[in-house]
């Protein structure tokens, strides 16, 4: 058995140093600092405001993780996906579905559930390029309801999910003309990895999934007449298997346990996790009966999760970066041009580039995608509502379509909040407030000096100290620069 | 009949013609005595690599219209004889490829038939990696063009690069393809010209400060920091340099409005602006036509054909057509027969296209047999590494040894 890592771009990006394997997954018993809380909220959510981080820090490690895994309160209300009004324009339907989901990520009070929903979207990568928007929305709802459930149940539900039946063509898979697409990908990408099954397993798996199709209302239906009732040999077992049997056989493979745990560790901890760490988490996963909540909980409470190796270790995905920026700046409503910017950053929600999903890791980082991140931050942080803009001299310009005036799409976090925290306009204290709120002080002393020079216009022809005439412009400018620092590209 | 392989011999190149090729093409396509390696290669030559992502169906691109077996296994999606653009008595182009046909008749297109490799992989991801790393036997991290860049680019010594010198290879899109992953060269990804820059409106201080923040950043514990800092420096300074350089180039034809043709328009601007660019990577897709193939594939082949037609017309109007060679690739061809969904599943060998003013136009290699199959799929006749080796040696003037593992025959298309 082998776990395929040959094509994983994250290989080579394991943090330096050595890991103490025996204690890596033991419960972290050290102090739960504000930085720990911010780290947890970035990984198990989309980051947050200074106030949200303080509130989480007050709960301690156990309390904070429990609050994310088992939210006490029901979530805020969300509007349903507005399918019917947009029935005749596929582009508008797609855009509405993307905005519907981004709104949930922005406003949810159960961020880990939505973060796992995003994880499963990347894992079972299905695209609106081929699948109608209403089915995509159904699939995201499915991921959300199984987000922290049992993997076996999730895989079975995905195998019968209308969006997936369209995406990987199983709706056309019948005993006269088997279609192998789903049977191959369910093993290669969803559960086992390349090299852990044979071409015969693909053929026999496809036969087992015959007759799992859609009715005329786009609902899952099993059509016995299209099902191949013959004997199949699959992963070393023989019988008259159907799709449910295939799912059970797959999940019982030890290689599956390592496959899924490696992916969870890459998502939550760091790239290219040690094989011993993967094995250790795989034991937790198997003992839990493939329970995702218990497995993710073990990660979020562990020593390795709060270690220096895991801190700011992996690049934020564009969706994490964008939702994190909006949440931090307290934008209440997703600006209309956000999907345009996400496209420039290399991650269109509901449209992964292929069934493999997004490669992540170093592939998020190139000249084009970084510029898109910088310019999105500039656009969000520097835009002030029309009523306020008259008081400032800032001009927010983007190459994207100008957003319609909607106060909800502007940041509610303003330079006045920073001044209030700093207790005035002392440059050093203002800089401290910005650094603490935006990046938990994750900047070098050189960077801090450069930023103070910026706030004082040291390098301008007419140096001006920070004051009532320029603080709006200066503090917005400084916030944008700090959010564009290398450390804020990392989760 | 002698096996196809017997025609191949190192140094003479491959020039195998089938059927009744018009005489002007036959002359052009036969191998000429080849010059010594690199001796006649212009150092300003540019290679444009076109990825046809998803696995392009070769049999509906270069159609073996006279073969009964083709119509038998493709009763619905097969293209009838009266639908193809005939190349000879046996094969023809997909009917949407009229622009391509013009280029072919001008002798600027080489069609390389039956390209593949032994033990073909039918997974998109593995097969794409194989094509982009040119390493089917041993998984590799760096791309074949990345290795070329590493071999031909001086290792930078840690000081900031001149921002106008970072465009030796570029990819036009938001992701870096594996083919261009190198050990020590950061290839800029240019999604679009107008978004390639740090935008702060009239606020010049912010822009200057942003540049200095990344210039002064120190790598920390995350191995991603160095990557972020290098890339950010190129991003913060490269856009202005690029816009300044290419401002003088005006396209002299109207390009079609699809995304692929727009990429080619930017490619022409970059080529015409003396940025020292040798490699440009563009992509078009998805050709993964499991269902309802004709609509999707014909649309994409139309973009490919019309886009390249505009591209070469523009280059010719700037007297650049002889400096540019474009080559296509796709991770695999598709199954011989149609499936139950009027599509085709993942297959093996397929044709490649080489296009350019200096290309010896014609058809290289026989059309693969539709009845003499291997595991039910087409047998390849020409290894894709032969095509790469040819491009490296006869177009980029670089020994393929060290870039491509093993020794491969060259093909006489250039």
Image: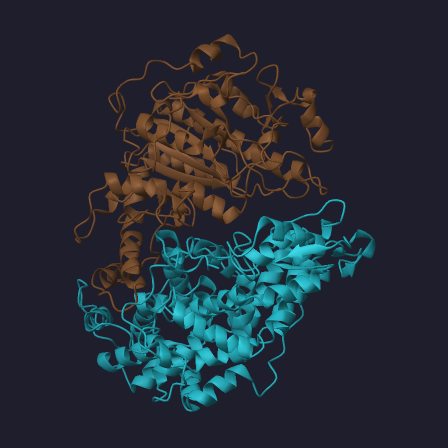
Chain colours: A cyan, B brown
Which residue is painted at 32% across and 41% down in the image? Answer: B169
Residue A414 x %, y %:
39, 76
Indicate left or right for B340 with A275 as reference: right
Residue A330 appears in the rendering: no
Q: Quadrant of the image for the N terminus of chain B?
A: top right
- Whole-percent x, y for residue B36 in the image: 26, 20
Q: Which quarter of the figure has residue B136?
A: top left
Image height of A182 relative to B135, above or below:
below
Residue at horizontal 60 percent and vertical 31 percent from the top: B373
Up-down relation of residue A186 to residue B136 (above or below) = below
- Quadrant holding the C terminus of chain B: top left
Q: Nearer the viewer, residue B84 or A272?
A: A272
One can see residue A365 in this view: yes
Residue for point 48% across, 69% down? A261
Extreme-top residue of the structure: B23
The residue closer to the viewer here, A254 or B154, is: A254
Q: Nearer the viewer, residue B103 or A275?
A: A275
């Amino acid at each position: 058995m082998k776990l395929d890592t040959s094509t994983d771009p994250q290989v080579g990006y394991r943090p330096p140093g050595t890991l103490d394997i025996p204690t890596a997954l033991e419960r972290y018993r050290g102090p739960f600092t504000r930085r720990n809380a911010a780290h947890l909220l970035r990984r198990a959510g989309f980051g947050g405001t200074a106030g949200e981080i303080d509130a989480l820090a007050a709960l301690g490690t156990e309390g904070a993780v429990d609050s994310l895994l088992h939210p006490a309160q029901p979530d805020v209300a969300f509007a349903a996906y507005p399918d019917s009004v947009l029935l005749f324009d596929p582009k508008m339907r797609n855009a509405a579905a993307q905005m519907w989901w981004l709104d949930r990520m922005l406003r949810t009070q159960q961020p880990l559930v939505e973060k796992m929903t995003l994880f499963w979207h990347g894992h079972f990568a299905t695209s609106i390029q081929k699948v109608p928007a209403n089915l995509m929305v159904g699939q995201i709802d499915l991921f959300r309801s199984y987000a922290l459930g049992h993997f076996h149940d999730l895989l079975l539900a995905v195998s019968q999910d209308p969006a997936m039946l369209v995406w990987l063509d199983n709706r056309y898979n019948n005993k006269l003309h088997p279609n192998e697409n789903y049977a191959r990908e369910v093993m290669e990408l969803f559960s086992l990895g390349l090299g852990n099954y044979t071409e015969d397993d693909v053929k026999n798996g496809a036969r087992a999934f015959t007759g799992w199709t859609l009715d005329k209302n786009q609902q899952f239906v099993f059509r016995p007449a299209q099902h191949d009732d013959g004997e199949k040999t699959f992963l070393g077992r023989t019988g008259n298997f159907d799709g449910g049997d295939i799912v059970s056989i797959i999940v019982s493979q030890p290689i599956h346990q390592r496959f899924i745990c490696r992916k969870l560790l890459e998502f939550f901890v760091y790239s290219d996790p040690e094989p011993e760490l993967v094995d250790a988490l795989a034991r937790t996963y198997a003992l839990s009966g493939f329970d995702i909540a218990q497995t993710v909980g073990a990660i979020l409470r562990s020593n390795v999760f709060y270690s220096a190796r895991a801190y700011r270790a992996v690049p934020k995905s564009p969706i994490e970066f964008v939702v994190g920026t909006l949440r931090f700046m307290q934008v209440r409503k997703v600006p209309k041009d956000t999907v345009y910017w996400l496209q420039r950053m290399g991650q269109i929600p509901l449209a992964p580039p292929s069934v493999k999903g997004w490669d992540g890791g170093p592939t998020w980082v190139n000249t084009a995608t970084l510029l898109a991140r910088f310019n999105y931050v500039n656009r969000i942080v520097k835009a002030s509502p029309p009523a306020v803009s008259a008081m400032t001299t800032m001009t927010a310009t983007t190459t994207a379509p100008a957003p319609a005036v909607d106060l909800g799409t502007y940041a509610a976090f303003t330079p006045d909040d920073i001044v209030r925290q700093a207790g005035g306009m002392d440059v050093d204290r203002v800089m401290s407030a910005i650094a603490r709120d935006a990046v938990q002080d994750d900047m070098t002393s050189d960077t801090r000096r450069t930023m103070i020079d910026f706030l004082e216009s040291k390098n301008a022809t007419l140096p001006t100290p920070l004051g009532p005439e320029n603080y709006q412009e200066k503090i917005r400018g400084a916030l944008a620069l700090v959010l564009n620092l290398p450390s804020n590209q990392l989760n | 009949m002698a096996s196809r392989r017997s025609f191949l011999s190192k140094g003479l190149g491959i020039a195998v013609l089938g059927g009744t090729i018009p005489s002007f093409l036959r002359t052009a396509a036969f191998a000429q005595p080849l010059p010594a390696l690199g001796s006649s290669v212009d150092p300003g030559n540019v290679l444009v690599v076109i990825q046809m992502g998803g696995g392009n169906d070769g049999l509906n691109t270069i159609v073996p219209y006279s073969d009964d077996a083709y119509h038998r296994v493709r009763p619905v999606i097969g293209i009838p004889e009266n639908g193809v653009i005939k190349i000879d008595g046996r094969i023809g182009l997909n009917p949407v490829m009229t622009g391509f046909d013009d280029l072919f008749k001008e002798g600027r297109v080489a069609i390389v038939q039956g390209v593949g490799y032994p033990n073909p992989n039918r997974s998109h991801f593995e097969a794409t990696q194989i094509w982009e790393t040119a390493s089917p036997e041993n998984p590799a991290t760096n791309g074949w063009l990345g290795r070329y860049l590493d071999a031909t680019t001086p290792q930078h010594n840690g000081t900031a690069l001149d921002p106008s010198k970072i465009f030796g290879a570029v990819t036009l899109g938001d992701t870096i393809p594996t083919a261009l992953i190198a050990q020590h060269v950061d290839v800029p990804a240019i999604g679009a010209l107008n978004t390639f820059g740090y935008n702060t409106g009239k606020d010049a201080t912010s822009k200057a400060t942003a540049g200095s923040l990344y210039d002064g950043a120190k790598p920390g514990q995350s191995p991603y920091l160095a990557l972020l800092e290098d890339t950010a420096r190129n991003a913060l300074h490269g856009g202005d340099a690029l816009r300044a350089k290419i401002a003088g180039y005006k396209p002299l034809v109207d390009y079609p409005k699809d995304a692929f043709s727009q990429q080619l328009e930017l490619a022409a601007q970059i080529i015409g602006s003396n940025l020292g660019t040798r490699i440009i990577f563009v992509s078009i897709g998805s050709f993964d036509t499991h269902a309802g193939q004709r609509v999707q594939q014909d649309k994409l082949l139309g973009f490919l054909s019309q886009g390249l037609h505009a591209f070469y017309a523009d280059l010719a109007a700037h007297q650049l057509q002889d400096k540019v060679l474009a080559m296509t690739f796709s991770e695999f061809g598709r199954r011989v027969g149609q499936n139950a969904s009027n599509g085709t599943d993942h297959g093996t060998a397929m044709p490649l296209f080489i296009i350019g003013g200096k290309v010896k136009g014609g058809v290289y290699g026989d059309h693969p047999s539709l009845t003499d199959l291997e595991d039910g799929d087409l047998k390849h006749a020409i290894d894709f590494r032969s095509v790469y080796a040819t491009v490296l040696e006869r177009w980029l003037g670089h020994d393929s040894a060290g870039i491509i593992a093993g020794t491969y025959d060259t093909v006489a298309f250039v």
